[in-house]
Amino acid sequence: MTPSNRIAVCPGSYDPITRGHIDVITRSAALFDEVVVAVVNLPVRKGKTLFDIDERLGLIADATEHLENVRPEPFDTLVVEFALKIGAKTIVKGLRAISDFEYEFEMNQLNRMQAPDIESLYLMASPQYSFLSSSGIKELAMFGGKIDDLVTPKVAQRLKEELAR
């Protein structure tokens, strides 16, 4: 890997992608030559997803189309294996609260044991997104809450279609 080819991975389930995710991806795109938004196909920690992998990839592509050096890709391996496969040396994650830090600290230690050459970079959530989570947005959408400022228009529409009561 040369300094002119710095690739980062932004992993997650993105079910659905939020303005908080887009903020971290956009900030990562300014730091790296290429950012791969790695979408876990079957998340272990979060269980079944509302949207299938193809739809999540499409919603991410739509939300990041203004970023020329960003592309979504599915993965179903360890994130460090995926990073090595695509030539990335950095995993970028957003942190909102202490609870995020505790989980990510544990994951970082496990990842370092698997692939010591892969670094983790943590970006603090921008203040307006520090409370934002995909699960919280899904709950708001389920009960008819206002989500239009929290997700893209396409995501808002799809959530309203899927979760309307």
Image: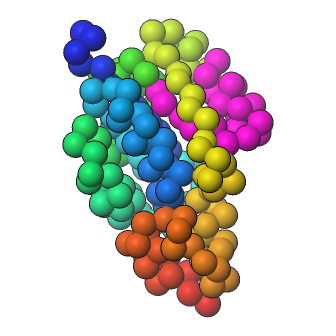
Closer to the camera in the image, 33 or 120: 33
**How is the rendered protein coloured?**
rainbow
Closer to the camera in the image, 109 or 27: 27
In the image: residue 44, left or right of residue 77? right
Is residue 151 covered in magenta?
A: no
Q: Position of residue 90 (x, y in %)?
A: 43, 22
Looking at the magenta stretch, what is its main secondary structure? Answer: helix
On screen, 80 above or below 22?
above
Q: Is residue 75 visible?
A: no
Q: Position of residue 59 (x, y in %)?
A: 36, 62
In the image: residue 19, left or right of residue 64? right
Residue at left 26%, top 54%?
Answer: 65
In the image: residue 58, left or right of residue 163? left
On screen, 97 above or below 146?
above
Image quadrant occupied by the N terminus: top left
Give the residues drawn in magenta, as a range.
91-109
Residue at the extreme front: 127
For the image, the number of numbered tags is 0
Residue 48, located in which quarter of the rendered image? bottom right
Residue 6, located in which quarter of the rendered image? top left
Image quadrant occupied by the C terminus: bottom right
